[in-house]
Structures are given as structure tokens and as C-alpha cells.
Amino acid sequence: MGPYPDVTWAVIAGGQARRLSGVPKGLLEFEGRPVLAWLLALSPLFAETLLVANVPEPYARFGLRTVADSVPDKGAPGGIHAALCAARTEWVMAVACDMPFVAPAAVRVLLEARGPEVDAVAFTVEGRVEPLLAVYRASLAAPWGEVLKQDNPSLRGLLAQCRARLLPEEALRAVDPALRSRVSVNTPEELVRWGLTWPGGPGAGTR
């Protein structure tokens, strides 16, 4: 058991990456390893790892406990809600499957900012909340589920409805000066910018 036995590590894979020709984003590679493999390197810190994927087949080889959205077609809010519903722990640490550079120190800062009066902890960068590098109390599942069934809220909107502790950008910069932990890869241009490759593409390994 790692140092956070009350936390589930939830990787939100969601649906298809339309801007990346439908390639599952967690299978994009950095230095020859899938992004998902980089994220799974942090799994030992937590009680359990959970993958939220509406199309789980591409990730089958990783052998992860996988769940689909319980309220469909709600994007990232639906993905995090699915993780909250499926968690067996009090807390869920959520990241997106296309974030290759999440630093353990950044995760630690978020987890150490939890408290009895807090339901969620996230960083703010350039005045914007970073909800896909954040920790959530699993008990948010029920109230968020009700909202999702009736509306299409953003994650920032959901956070505004709970007791969220928003950490300043400086709190992330202190452990991750270039803010690489928040990088997500959504377009071919970002793929090139951050040095990632297509699965099985040039520079890709077999690991």
C-alpha cells in the first residue's frame, strides 16, 4: 500500500480523440512508452488505479479495472463522475490520459491540501482552474450525478458548487517550474510540440 491508501488514481480516457484521427490518446507515446504507462508509474502511491474509458478495448493490455461513464455524453465531467461512482476509497485523484508529464510532487501538493472542510483541491494557472489534475471527495458522486442528468455543466462549474480549495499557480510552480504537469495533448500540433509520437510511429518502442 502506498502513502495514500484513501485515494484512487483515476485516469480519464473518455471517448475518441477526434482531432487525433481517433487514436486513443493514452496510447500516444513519449520516449517510446505510452502516455498511460507514464501515468501508471504513479500507481504505487495509491490504493487502486481506475481507468475511465467508454471504449476500453485499446487499453485491455494494461489489465486495469475499467469503467464507462454512468451518465453518457457529458465529456470530462462525466468521466470524473464515473470515477467518483466507482471508487472504493474516500478520495479520487483524477488526471487525463493525455498528460505525459504529471510530476509526483504536484500530486503530493494537491493531496496534502485536503482537509475535513474540503471536497476538492485543484490548481489555478493563468486564472483558470485545472480540473483534470485535481483531487475529489468520492461523496461528490451523488450530487454531481443529479446535476449531470439535468444539465451539461463544465468541470469548473461543478467545482464552483462544492467546497473547493483552489491552489495558486505558485503552488504548482514551486514543484514544477515549467508547469509541465498540466500539459495535455489534444492536437497534432501539440503532439509535435511536446515530442510525442503516434503509437508504433517513428521513435516508438514496444514496451
Image (tube, rainbow, N blue to C red):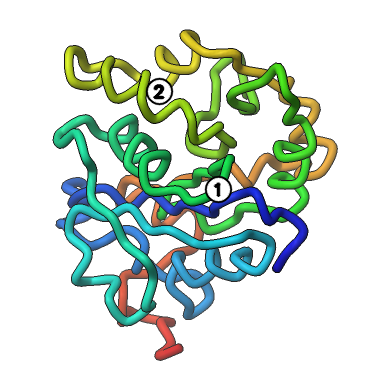
Lower position in the chain sequence, tag 2 or tag 1: 1
The one nearer the camera, 27 or 204, is 27
Q: Residue 32: percent from the left, percent from the top?
A: 48, 80
Drawn side of residue 124 relative to residue 104, left or right:
left
The C terminus - image quarter: bottom left
Residue 155: numbered disc: 2
Query: Which residue is identified by label 1?
Result: 89
Farthest residue to the bottom: give it. Answer: 206
Relative to 9, is 164 above or below? Answer: above
Amino acid at the residue labelled 2:
Leu
Q: Residue at x 39, y 70 (%)?
A: 64
Q: Is residue 108 above or below residue 48?
A: above
* Quadrant showing the N terminus: bottom right
Q: Residue at x 41, y 16 (%)?
A: 158
Which residue shows up at 32% across the image and 41% down it? 82
Mark 1 lies on a secondary structure that is loop
Q: Above or below — where is 104 with respect to 38?
A: above
